[in-house]
Image (cartoon, coloured by chain):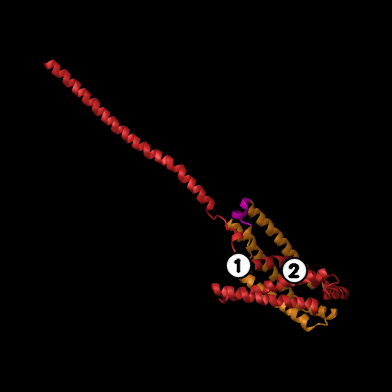
Chain colours: A red, B orange
């Protein structure tokens, strides 16, 4: 009886410890499974998030698309002030050549005074006067803005319009001077 | 890049550049108005009259000051344009080299204008 009891106890203990192990194992497995699940969830989410980022990167405006932007009048006036300035750096060569010729001899003076017989000379001189008129008027606008006149958005827009008006008046006068007068 | 940008400016400081560019602009505007007014008031201008105008010392000084104003004004303006558009962000690592090269040409043209201008005003016989 006692032998039987001890075998039973051993079996009971063994089975209990096995059950305990199994339970523990199950817990471990469960824990591992949930860890796995979290990890796999991360693994699953990561490429997904990456994909989303890629599409966002593509849509993000890294550079301004100038074809979709209408230049405001102040920007237009500013960029043309720069362009006329760059062109005038070359245009001054023509003006200096005209000054040199006008001071050389009575013949070359007469040629400069009538701007030559070639109509292309007239057009080139008109072009230089156009650049000079525009650049000078826009320069005066800058001086006005340095003194605090027309520094607001509305003031800047109005100033640009006024400057364009005066530049056009001077350009028309230059044309009249060359071809009519 | 920042050092290379500032060291090639005209007055070595933005405030000097700003002032020189504006004073130069006013001088050039005054010279232009003077010449246009002179030509408009003398429609029958003769070669002798024109030559005698440029033989006055004050006219030669006025012309030379205008020429110096033009060179400094153009240097400051074109420096601003070059440092705005020939940048590393826009053109990559070659930008600084390209800009210095462009400024060398700009300087050569500016000096040529100056020497040529002095020849014109002091070459009158």
Q: Is residue B18 left or right of residue B33?
A: left
Label 2 near label 1: C-beta < 8 Å?
no
Mark 2 crowdedness (10 Å alpha carbons): few <14, some 14-19, many ≥20: some
Q: CA distance from mark 1 to mark 2?
A: 26 Å
Q: How many numbered badges does the structure rendering display? A: 2
Numbered circle sitting on residue A154: none
Report the residue at 43% width, 43% height from top. A45
Q: Which residue is mark 2?
A: A92
Task: Characterize the local packing of mark 1: few (<14), some (14-19) or many (20 or more) Cα atoms within 10 angstroms.
Answer: few
Q: Does residue A123 show up?
A: yes
First reached walking from the N terminus: tag 1 or tag 2: 1
The answer to whether one can see residue B114 in this image is no
Give the main secondary structure of the magenta stretch. helix
Question: Helix or strand or loop: what does disc 2 sit on?
Answer: helix
Residue A96 part of the magenta-drawn span: no
Spot the residue most to the left: A1
**Is B92 included in the stretch rendered in magenta?**
yes
Please identify the quarter of the rendering in which residue B32 is found. bottom right
> Which circle, 1 or 2, is nearer the viewer?
1
State the residue in front, A82 or A99.
A82
Quadrant occupied by the C terminus of chain B: bottom right
Callout 1: helix, strand or loop? Answer: helix
Question: Which range of residues does the magenta coloring cover?
Answer: B86-93
- Whole-percent x, y for residue A94 in the image: 78, 68
Residue marked by disc 1: A75
């Amino acid at each position: 009886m006692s032998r039987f009891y001890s075998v039973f106890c051993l079996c009971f203990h063994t089975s209990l410890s096995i059950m305990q192990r199994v339970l523990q194992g199950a817990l471990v497995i469960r824990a591992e499974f949930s860890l796995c699940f979290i990890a796999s969830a991360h693994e699953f989410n990561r490429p997904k998030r990456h994909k989303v980022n890629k599409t966002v990167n593509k849509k993000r405006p890294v550079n301004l698309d100038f074809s979709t932007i209408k230049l405001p009048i102040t920007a237009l006036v500013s960029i043309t002030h720069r362009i006329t300035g760059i062109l005038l750096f070359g245009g001054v060569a023509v003006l200096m050549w005209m000054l040199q010729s006008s001071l050389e001899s009575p013949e070359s003076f007469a040629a400069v005074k009538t701007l030559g017989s070639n109509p292309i000379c007239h057009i080139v001189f008109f072009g230089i006067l156009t650049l000079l008129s525009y650049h000078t008027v826009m320069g005066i606008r800058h001086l006005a803005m340095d003194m605090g006149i027309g520094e607001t958005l509305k003031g800047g827009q109005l100033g640009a319009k006024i400057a364009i008006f005066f530049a056009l008046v001077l350009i028309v006068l230059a044309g009249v001077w060359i071809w009519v007068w | 890049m920042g050092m290379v940008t500032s060291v090639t400016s005209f007055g070595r400081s933005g405030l000097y550049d700003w002032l020189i560019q504006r004073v130069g602009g006013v001088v050039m505007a005054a010279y232009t108005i003077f010449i246009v007014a002179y030509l408009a008031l003398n429609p029958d201008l003769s070669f002798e009259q024109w030559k005698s105008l440029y033989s006055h010392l004050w006219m030669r000084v006025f012309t030379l000051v205008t020429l110096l104003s033009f060179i400094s004004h153009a240097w400051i303006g074109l420096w601003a344009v070059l440092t705005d558009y020939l940048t590393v962000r826009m053109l990559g690592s070659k930008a600084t080299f390209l800009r210095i090269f462009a400024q060398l040409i700009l300087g050569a043209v500016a000096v040529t204008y100056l020497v040529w201008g002095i020849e014109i005003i002091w070459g009158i016989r």
